[in-house]
Image (cartoon, grey):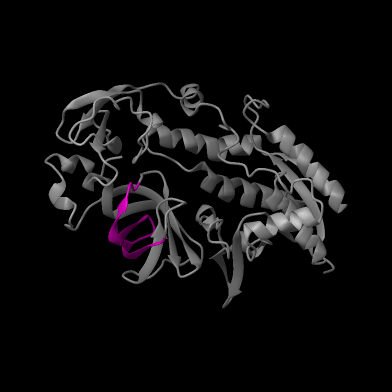
Amino acid sequence: MAGKRVIVGMSGGVDSSVAALLLKQQGYEVSGLFMKNWEDDDTDEYCSSREDLVDAVAVADKLGIEIDVVNFSAEYKERVFGDFLREYRAGRTPNPDVLCNAEIKFRAFLDHALGLGADRIATGHYAQVREADGLYQLLKAEDGTKDQSYFLYRLDQAQLAKTLFPLGTLYKREVRAIARREGLPTHDKKDSTGICFIGERPFREFLSRYLPDNPGEIRTLEGRVVGRHQGFMFYTIGQRQGLGIGGNREGDGEPWYVAAKDLRHNRLVVVQGHDHPALFHDRLKATDLNWISGSTPHCQWVYSAKTRYRQKDAACAIASVSAEQCEIEFAEPQWAITPGQSVVVYESRVCLGGGIIESAERTREDSRASECPPGAELLKDEG
């Protein structure tokens, strides 16, 4: 594979370690790059970047490849963290991992790697790239439990053309087995979770350092005050824990869930029970769209979509689409559709793209609708 120089984004985890190993075995000229994306209060108490760098270097040494370190913290703070704070200020719940992939791992990293003379980059993401009819497609990974295409939907043709996902056809257990067999020091390392700039620290404590509290009332759909919230940034649609109203249960004593954010009056709207009808919506509006092929999908065709990473694919149709926004209608009502999160559309195993959820509503009556009490109109177009 002369001339096929690949720089692998090595995070110090088992996935990127095996990705580098496999590419070297396939004959690529491989080197590694460790990205440092966060500097504010970068301490070992909450952020594992120092330990991760040590592990990445140890793997590179085992594989006999070079590894460099690049600091993208300025780009991260401007392109990802800035958006993260703006979304929370607006009462939404953002997903910074999506933006980090688009702006840092597959833009800043890609540009840096190409500047170093690389032909392509690679990461340990569980996804696949396929070229078909002159276009690059993003496909789900074979391991459906680890598939990360949801987080990659904002990539474009230029990025996919230069990207390799060596783990796309493997199952996680196979990746662990390869790492163990080859004696990689990360073979039994626990998978990382969450975002480094938050780490294991208390989420409320972290956000309070950057955004002011804005307390308000917690009300039921009927308008009865049942508590106080500390600010919309601390709550998301479908949230159960941390509401502080557990002792104020009524009826059959079911727990409370956040059903909506009344932005106009700074009120959190709650309902009782996981299956309360107010938590279900069958239509959403999304903006800030990205379609991987460069063309918009067909309206009224049957697709599937996810409104959160761990959700099962849900049958849907694109009711309308323009350059600025689209409306997606689901065959069955979906639970806790959350403004600020991403809706990602698929055609079979191909990820078509998606956008940021702006609002959600119920357009059809179903068995749950009859249970919804007066005041449910608060739930439409709020969030």
- Give the residue at the far bottom of this rendering: 133
Residue at the outermost front position: 252
Is 96 left, or right, of 185 in this rendering?
A: left
Taking the spot 29% from the left edge, 43% from the top edge, the residue there is 274
The image quarter containing residue 69 is: top right
Majority secondary structure in the magenta region: strand
Residue 31 vs 268, above or below: the answer is below
- Residue 315 is inside the magenta segment: yes
Place of residue 379 in the rendered image (x, y in percent of width and height, measured from the top left): 23, 42
Q: Position of residue 53 (x, y in %)?
A: 75, 38
- 101 and 296: which is toward the camera: 101
Up/down of 236 relative to 122, above or below: above
Residue 198 x, y percent position in the rendering: 56, 32
Q: Which residues are magenta?
A: 313-337
Q: Quadrant of residue 332?
A: bottom left
Residue 236 within the segment the image draws in magenta = no
Find residue 280 and report its horizontal and vertical position in percent. Answer: 27, 50
- Taking the spot 44% from the left edge, 41% from the top edge, the residue there is 94
Which quadrant is the C terminus positioned in?
top left
State whether residue 199 is above or below residue 340: above
Query: Residue, x 75% and y 58% (percent of image)?
Result: 178
Residue in the image at 82% along x and 52% along y: 183
Instruction: Count the labels in the image.
Output: 0
Q: Closer to the camera, 143 or 376?
A: 143
Q: Is residue 66 visible?
A: no
- Dividing the image into 4 quarters, which one contains the N terminus? bottom right
Q: Nearer the viewer, residue 32 or 288?
A: 32
Instruction: Classify residue 71 as left or right of residue 92.
Output: right
Residue 194 seen in this snapshot: yes
